[in-house]
Image (spheres, rainbow, N blue to C red):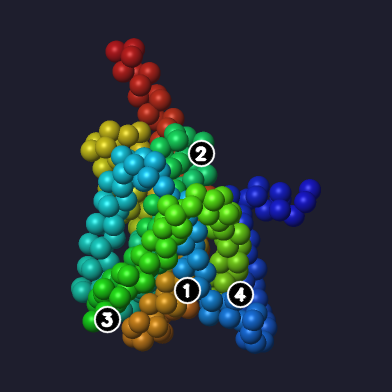
């Protein structure tokens, strides 16, 4: 079997495998990562913001008026609700929780794990259990899954320029949308851009991870994953089912921790140096949580679908 086909058999393998390879390099031969440019500036954490900007641009090139209307019908309310949860949780952690956090889990780790959405995992789940409208929400889920949302919160808490941070996040996306509206040929030209960047981004994110540190904080990673998953999944599921009157597949699928989020501890420390001592442990704990949610969420979504099916059958019988 060819390497690419083998990697694709792993859930979100094009992200996870490069993350693991980057972590191996960072753990056992960190000197290689600092060998010099163009390697260092492209394939390590030094190039993360460039990769994120390109992801936003490529996402924008795939959005047109038809897609935007579909997203507005279903994905936008769910995304806005999740953003509301993000800012409530993040503001609480920054204002009332010390930087060292609780249970040996820093507030940086809690925010990183909670303010995340694994759009690749989302798409793989709704492709199986959702419909075309759920699938059209992929671009929006990609946007809210980027660390820029959390970085806005950190900028605000550090008295940074919130307007500039917001514009810096939106401009690449708007440029992409503008290119598509100017000429639809750009949509075809850049359609595979994000997919091409995923392995490169994965490796760069992996260079933030120390495998030794990750295994040393295994319990904290499990606790972090369980708590943030419950705090994210239950409200989103209730909102999707009770308010939007949807089956809940999209809500569950949107609660995965993304590989992109592994860049947040490092980037947040650049904004607020007080978080610098916690970057390594937060990244390691979130990396373990990422692996767990990647494999757990598809199972949980299928379990929920099975439960709903059984409930429908019982309702018909009675």
- Left or right position of 220 against 25: left
Q: Residue furthest right?
A: 1
Question: Do residues under tags 1 and 4 come within 8 Å of each other at their CB atoms?
Answer: no
Mark 1 vs 4, N-terminal side:
4
Separation of disc 1 and disc 4 at Cα? 12 Å
Q: Mark 1 or mark 2, which has the lower sequence index?
A: 1
- Which of disc 4 and disc 3 is earlier in sequence? 4
Q: Residues within 10 Å of mark 1 (few under 14, many from 20)?
A: some
Q: Is residue 13 left or right of residue 62?
A: right
Quick one: 139 or 272, which is closer to the camera?
Answer: 139
Q: Residues within 10 Å of mark 4 (few under 14, many from 20)?
A: many
Relative to 98, say whether 236 is above or below: above
Residue under the image location 31 percent in, 69 percent down? 166
SS for dot 2: helix
Between disc 1 and disc 2, the foreground one is 1
Marks 1 and 2, how far apart in space?
Answer: 29 Å
Label 3 close to label 4 by CB (< 8 Å): no
Residue 295 shows in the view: yes
Q: Which residue is mark 4?
A: 43
Q: Nearer the viewer, residue 60 or 273?
A: 60
Q: Which residue was labeled with disc 1? A: 49
The percent position of residue 44, horizontal first and vertical second, equals 58, 77
Residue 313 image position (x, y, % from top left): 38, 18
Sequence-wise, the earlier of marks 3 and 1 is 1
Q: Are marks 2 and 4 in contact (CB under 8 Å)?
A: no
The residue at which mark 3 appears reads as 160
- For disc 3, the neighbor class at 10 Å (few under 14, some 14 to 19, many from 20) is some
Disc 3 on helix, strand or loop?
Answer: loop
Residue 304, image x, y percentages: 40, 36
Q: Which residue is mark 2?
A: 127
């Amino acid at each position: 079997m060819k390497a690419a086909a083998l990697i694709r058999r792993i859930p979100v393998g094009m992200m996870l495998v490069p993350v693991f390879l980057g972590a191996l390099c960072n753990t056992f031969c960190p000197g290689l990562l600092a060998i010099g440019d163009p390697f260092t500036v492209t394939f390590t954490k030094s190039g993360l913001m460039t990769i994120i900007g390109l992801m936003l641009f490529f996402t924008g090139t795939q959005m047109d008026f038809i897609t935007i209307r579909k997203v507005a019908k279903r994905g936008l309310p769910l995304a806005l609700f999740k953003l509301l949860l993000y800012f409530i949780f993040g503001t609480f952690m920054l204002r009332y929780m010390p930087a060292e956090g609780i249970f040996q889990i820093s507030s940086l780790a809690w925010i990183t794990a909670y303010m995340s959405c694994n759009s690749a995992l989302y798409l793989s789940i709704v492709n199986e259990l959702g419909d075309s409208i759920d699938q059209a929400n992929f671009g929006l889920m990609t946007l809210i899954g980027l660390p820029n949302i959390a970085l806005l919160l950190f900028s605000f808490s550090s008295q940074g320029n919130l307007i500039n941070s917001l514009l810096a996040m939106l401009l690449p996306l708007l440029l992409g949308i503008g290119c598509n509206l100017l000429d639809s040929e750009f949509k075809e030209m850049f359609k595979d851009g994000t997919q091409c960047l995923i392995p490169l981004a994965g490796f760069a994110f992996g260079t933030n991870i120390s495998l030794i540190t990750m295994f040393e904080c295994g319990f904290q990673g499990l606790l972090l994953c369980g708590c943030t998953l419950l705090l994210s999944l239950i409200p989103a599921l209730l909102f999707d089912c009770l308010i939007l009157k949807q089956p809940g597949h999209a809500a569950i699928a949107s609660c995965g921790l993304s590989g992109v989020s592994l860049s947040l501890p490092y980037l947040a420390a650049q904004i607020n140096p007080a978080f610098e001592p916690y970057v390594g442990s937060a990244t390691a704990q979130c990396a373990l949580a990422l692996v767990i949610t990647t494999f757990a969420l598809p199972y949980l979504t299928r379990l929920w679908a099975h439960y709903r099916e059984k409930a429908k059958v019982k309702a018909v019988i009675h």
